[in-house]
Amino acid sequence: MSLVHLANVCSHLQNASKARLGLTSIPSSKQLLSLSLALQSAGFIQTVARGGLTPPRLESLSTYVPEPVTQENISTRRLWLGLKYFDNEPVLRNMSMVSKPTKRIWMDVEGLGRIVRGREAGFVKGLTRPGECIFVTTDRGVLEARECVERKIGGMLLCRVI
């Protein structure tokens, strides 16, 4: 996956949450789907649904069945994300890239352990705020840094979410 697309998605989700949108869409890919599901399991977004150019209805989002993917409509596939808000404030306040397209940052388990404990590892600052997460792409999919330390696997740091 291109990190340029991920950088665009990070800025899009940050801007959409600041604009107080209830539902937004991003391009559909396997990597963005696994990142979206990791964001959902971490509690930053509410729903993830695959769909086309038109958004699914909010009332039937949990039972929404997308149209099947064919060669004619594969370029129009989108991921529709329901954003979360608490006390009239967005849950996803800041989403920034850790690895850049020109500089990818790989971290082993020891480095991820330092980051999780709030210390600096290499060029990456530790997790110091409550609810702050770093997402890592591994051979087992996109995982949160704490989960990577528990499973004792390393990978490339993708993004930091506050």
Image: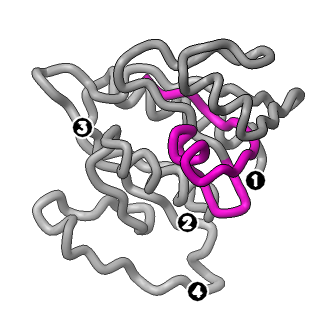
User: For the point 53% across and 50% down, which residue is it?
Assistant: 35
Q: CA distance from mark 4 to mark 1?
A: 22 Å
Q: CA distance from mark 2 to mark 3?
A: 25 Å
Q: Which mark is residue 110?
A: none
Which color mode does the image show? one colour
Q: CA distance from mark 3 to mark 1?
A: 26 Å
Q: Nearer the viewer, residue 150 or 5?
A: 150
Q: Which of the marked residues, 2 or 3, is nearer the chain's N terminus?
A: 2
Q: Which mark is residue 76?
A: 2
Q: At label 4, which amino acid type do we have?
A: Thr
How many residues crowd around disc 1 within 10 Å: few (fewer than 14), some, or many (20 or more)? few
How many residues crowd around disc 3 within 10 Å: few (fewer than 14), some, or many (20 or more)? many
Q: At label 1, which amino acid type do we have?
A: Met
User: For the point 25% across and 74% down, which residue is it?
Assistant: 64
Q: Which residues are magenta?
A: 137-162
Q: Quadrant of the C terminus?
A: top left
Q: Is residue 91 above or below residue 144?
A: above
How many residues crowd around disc 4 within 10 Å: few (fewer than 14), some, or many (20 or more)? few
Could you tell me residue 103's position as x and y percent? 87, 27
Identify the residue under disc 3: 84
Could you tell me residue 113's position as x and y percent? 63, 31
Q: Which of the marked residues, 3 or 1, is nearer the chain's N terminus?
A: 1
